[in-house]
Amino acid sequence: MGDDRFVPRGHPESNVTALDDVLLGGAGSTGGAPLPTANIHPFPTDRALAEFRDTRWCAAQYAEELCAQVPMVDGNWPGFDLIFVGVGDDGHVLSCFPESPALASMAWTMGIPAPSHIGPHLPRVTINPRLLEAAPVLVVTWGAGKARPWATSSARFETSAAGRSSGRAGRARSGSWTKRRPPRSPPTFAASDPAAESLSALRS
């Protein structure tokens, strides 16, 4: 899991609940992905809450699990085959909100205070959005209300990718990098019809 609300697994506001109920075929859902239980690695919110721990402890435990389970790439960052994220109503991905100090962090995982500007108003735990540079990214949006944040997020990804490309070239010429990060493909965006139609209207 890339991020979660700091609530127990099974709570209506837990990101893992949707995974359990839909993707894994629980709660009466037909089918479900044939994923072994051992391959599911949520943030340990249940344990943290049971032991009266905070989000920082929960995030640190998850970082240890990443270190043990995921191969390291690009200067000792965990690498993934694919990262699947959504977009919030304010354009955030994972649980790092616009203008958040967390965006400057180099930690793999972080505890995030409950946001006041967007619901649900619950503390969060999240991986660092820098990890999105270490894997192909699939961004999914749903509903007409996500068109504007989708447009904003896609523009930020394009600007960030362009900046990284120019930065790579400059450092290569100056010889200041001993190991360069390989170029990454831009993220793939998938949207429901209402979101896509609204985005087209915004851009026209």
Image (cartoon, rainbow, N blue to C red):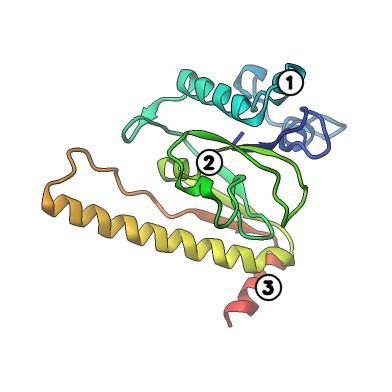
Disc marking residue 83: 2
Foreground residue, 10 or 116?
116
Q: Earlier in the sequence, mark 3 or mark 2?
A: 2
Identity, as a three-letter code, of the amino acid under mark 3: Ser
Disc marking residue 186: none
Is 168 on the left-hand or right-hand side of 128? left
Q: Earlier in the sequence, mark 2 or mark 1?
A: 1
Q: Position of residue 6 (x, y in %)?
A: 72, 34
The residue carrying mark 3 is 198
The residue carrying mark 1 is 52
Q: Residues within 10 Å of mark 3 (few under 14, many from 20)?
A: some
Identity, as a three-letter code, of the amino acid under mark 2: Ile
- Which dot, 3 or 1, sits closer to the camera? 1
Label total for image: 3
Look at the picture and state if 40 lies above or below 134: above
Is 41 on the left-hand or right-hand side of 156? right
> In percent of the image, x 48 and y 62: which residue is there?
156
Extreme-bottom residue of the structure = 204
Q: Residues within 10 Å of mark 2 (few under 14, many from 20)?
A: some
